[in-house]
Amino acid sequence: MTGPEIPESHPRYESLLTRHRIEEGVDLGITSKQGLIAQGRGEAFDYLLGEETIPSADAAERVAAAHLLAAERPVISVNGNVAALAPGETVALAAATGADIEINLFNRTDERMERIAEHLREHGAERIKGLAADGRIPGLDHERAKVDADGIGSADVVLVPLEDGDRAAAIAETGTTELVVDLNPLSRSAKAATVPIVDNVLRAVPNVTAHAEDLAGADEAALAELIGSFDAEATLDAAEERIRSGGPSCDRLT
Ligand code: ATP
Ligand code: MG
């Protein structure tokens, strides 16, 4: 899935590719209309961040990789935007970390669940969770609480790209270590996270994979040290500072 008429040399290639994939996701019945709105909000923040992985996000991505590798039951949560934007990248991250993939939708319909599962299978996913929906996240209303009991329901570490703030907070309440990808450092999702990754999911997921591959030989103590030295608040502050100051690449945006 690539942008048909977008030359890679275009200065905003990635942004246009992202739009194209989301539009295609809506056409395929994978992405919801609300997903388009979430995309628009994300795009604005990405523009302000300079449409690049800032150093604090890269550091968070390495810590997220360490969490996934150190976990006993890691799960990557996939919604309609993530499925449209980074299906193959998500499958590659699951393979690199031994994580399960679970489909978890804000607006859950059986049809959309099935379409996303099919789309992920086309991109190489073998086992997909989320369809059983035999577990619940406490503190959420019925539909939004649904998870698989042997997936997010009993995971020790969950990567949730673009999670809704309410649900991110409810998952954090259960004591599960939560790794959140969200371009808005002020969002409740990012604030609820053990590890907030303020980056575009399109860049973040492959970069977590690259870090996981790099850390594959690391022992438990090395992973624990990386994990223990992480400061979530400082990470959010660094992203906010980049947005407010324009950062080193602000000239690119004028
Ligand atoms: P809350 O404050 O409760 O977290 P929200 O307003 O952030 O709520 P939504 O609008 O549903 O809730 O969330 C969409 C979020 O997803 C936004 O914060 C947006 O920045 C982020 N987002 C959208 N597209 C991407 C993307 N491609 N990569 C990373 N984050 C994205
Ligand atoms: Mg949010």
Image (cartoon, rainbow, N blue to C red):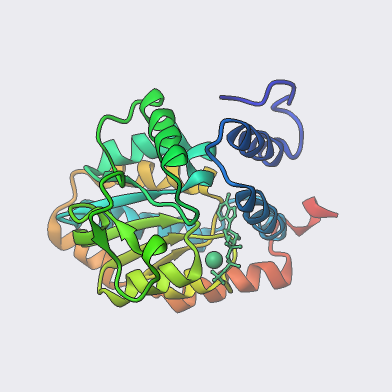
Vertical order, 226 against 127 (above or below) = below
Please report the residue visible at 52 percent of the width from the left and 59 percent of the height from the top: 55
Nearer to me, 164 or 28 = 28
Nearer to me, 61 or 122 = 122
- On screen, residue 116 versus residue 93, left or right, reads right
Please report the residue visible at 40 percent of the width from the left and 57 percent of the height from the top: 160
Residue situated furthest top in the rendering: 4
In the rendered image, residue 132, in percent from the top left (x then y), is placed at 25, 46
Please report the residue visible at 25 percent of the width from the left and 35 percent of the height from the top: 127
Vertical order, 183 against 90 (above or below) = below
Nearer to me, 129 or 9 = 129
Q: Quadrant of residue 119?
A: top left
The quadrant of the rendered image in which ligand 2 is seen is bottom right
In the rendered image, residue 247, in percent from the top left (x then y), is placed at 69, 64
Q: Is residue 49 visible from the viewing direction of this image?
A: yes
Q: Quadrant of residue 187?
A: bottom right
In the rendered image, residue 198, in percent from the top left (x then y), is placed at 53, 61
- On screen, residue 110 versus residue 53, left or right, reads left
Residue situated furthest right in the rendering: 254
Quadrant location of the N terminus? top right
